[in-house]
Image (cartoon, grey):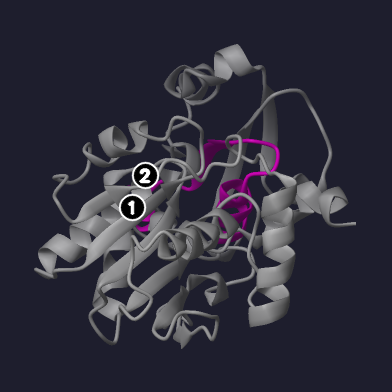
């Protein structure tokens, strides 16, 4: 599955940049797009090699990771179950999960915090069950994300990515180090108090001077927006033809443009932005665009 990734690098024509490019991981698949496939790739291989046929994972009611896992399981002839954080709800994302055959277990937030305990409670006697952490966070996920660096056609001065758990960022940093590049990695945490992302990355990779965190672009926190961010999305998409989402990629592109305005990055440097997909997240905020 996905032996040949459809993930081109495309140039963006947006003032004042002359060398702004985007790695279109959002084009990998409509439902297993972006970093979701990168993070699941080696987890699926590990599960299959161990004879596991039942993927068990975790996420919120609007989780792109849940949709991706459900779709990947269906394509691989595997079963899938998800612990969904919070009260029972119905929405477009969970509908897609169930269409792909995923079973949903709605879990109150206090119990959800201990994911291993949730797994053990339901599946300790299921020898076919395979634990996948929220968002796919794992060493295998960083290996998949590190491969992005080897696919790039040129060396860039700066690479930007948005971060929720830091797994994708850790993989990118690992790839930069393994290939001995001078590239600077700029990580945009999408949660308030995003300094913890560096600690999360350090679980998987040695944090180096290649890394810079920009923690002031969360717009109120995870899945939070402001009128300024919504207006930015509308303007950016209409100008570039590139669809971005309010949770991750919009905050990243806003940061790139704002950092250039502050002269913290050179508009003529070679800059690559990683489009991590997640576009289905727009469905959870559709009223903000009406």
Q: Nearer the viewer, residue 185 or 105?
A: 185
Residue holding disc 1: 169
Query: To which quarter of the image does residue 238 belong?
Result: bottom right
Q: Is residue 49 visible?
A: no
Please rate how many residues cluster around mark 2, counting C-alpha atoms within 10 Å: few if below 14, some from 14 to 19, many from 20: many
Furthest residue toward left: 180
- Look at 49% across and 65% down and name the residue there: 257
Q: Is residue 227 visible?
A: yes
Q: Quadrant of the C terminus?
A: bottom right
Residue 202, how many percent across, how many down? 21, 38
In the image, residue 172 sits, relative to residue 133, either above or below, namely below
In the image, residue 206 sits, relative to residue 26, either above or below, namely above
- Look at 20% across and 57% down and name the residue there: 174
Identify the element where label 1 is drawn: helix
Q: Nearer the viewer, residue 274 or 251?
A: 251
Please state the extent of the stretch shown in magenta in the rendering.
Answer: 45-73
Please rate how many residues cluster around mark 1, counting C-alpha atoms within 10 Å: few if below 14, some from 14 to 19, many from 20: many
Furthest residue toward top: 110
Position of 164 with respect to 108 (left or right) is: left
Furthest residue toward right: 290
- Look at 46% across and 64% down and name the residue there: 261
Query: To which quarter of the image does residue 30 belong?
Result: bottom right
Cα distance in 3D space between marks 2 and 1: 5 Å
Residue holding disc 2: 166
In the image, residue 51 sits, relative to residue 134, either above or below, namely below
Residue 235, how many percent across, how many down? 71, 70
**Decide: marks 2, 1 in contact (CB < 8 A)?**
yes
Residue 53, how many percent across, how many down? 48, 48
């Amino acid at each position: 599955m996905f032996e040949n990734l459809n993930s081109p690098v495309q140039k963006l024509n947006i003032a004042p940049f002359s060398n702004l490019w985007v790695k279109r991981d959002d084009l990998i698949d409509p439902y297993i797009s972006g970093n979701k496939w990168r993070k699941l790739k080696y987890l699926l291989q590990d599960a299959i090699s161990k004879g596991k046929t039942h993927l068990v994972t975790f996420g919120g009611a609007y989780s792109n990771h849940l949709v991706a896992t459900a779709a990947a399981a269906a394509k691989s002839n595997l079963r899938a179950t998800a612990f969904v954080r919070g009260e029972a709800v119905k929405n477009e994302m969970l509908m897609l999960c169930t269409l792909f055959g995923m079973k949903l277990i709605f879990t109150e937030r206090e119990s959800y915090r201990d994911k291993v305990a949730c797994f053990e409670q339901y599946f300790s006697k299921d020898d076919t069950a395979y634990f996948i952490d929220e968002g796919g966070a794992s060493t295998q996920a960083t290996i998949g994300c590190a491969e992005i660096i080897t696919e790039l056609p040129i060396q860039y001065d700066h690479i930007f990515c948005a971060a929720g758990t830091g797994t994708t960022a850790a993989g990118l940093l690992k790839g930069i180090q393994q290939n001995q590049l001078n590239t600077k990695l700029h990580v945009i945490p999408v949660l308030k108090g995003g300094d913890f992302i560096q600690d999360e990355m350090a679980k998987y990779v040695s944090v180096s001077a290649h890394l810079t965190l920009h923690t002031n672009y969360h717009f109120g926190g995870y899945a939070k927006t402001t009128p300024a961010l919504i207006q930015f999305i509308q303007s950016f998409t209409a100008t570039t033809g590139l669809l971005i989402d309010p949770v991750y990629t919009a905050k990243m592109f806003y940061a790139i443009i704002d950092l250039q305005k502050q002269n913290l990055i050179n508009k003529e440097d070679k800059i690559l932005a990683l489009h991590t997909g997640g576009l289905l997240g727009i469905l959870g905020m559709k009223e903000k665009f009406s």
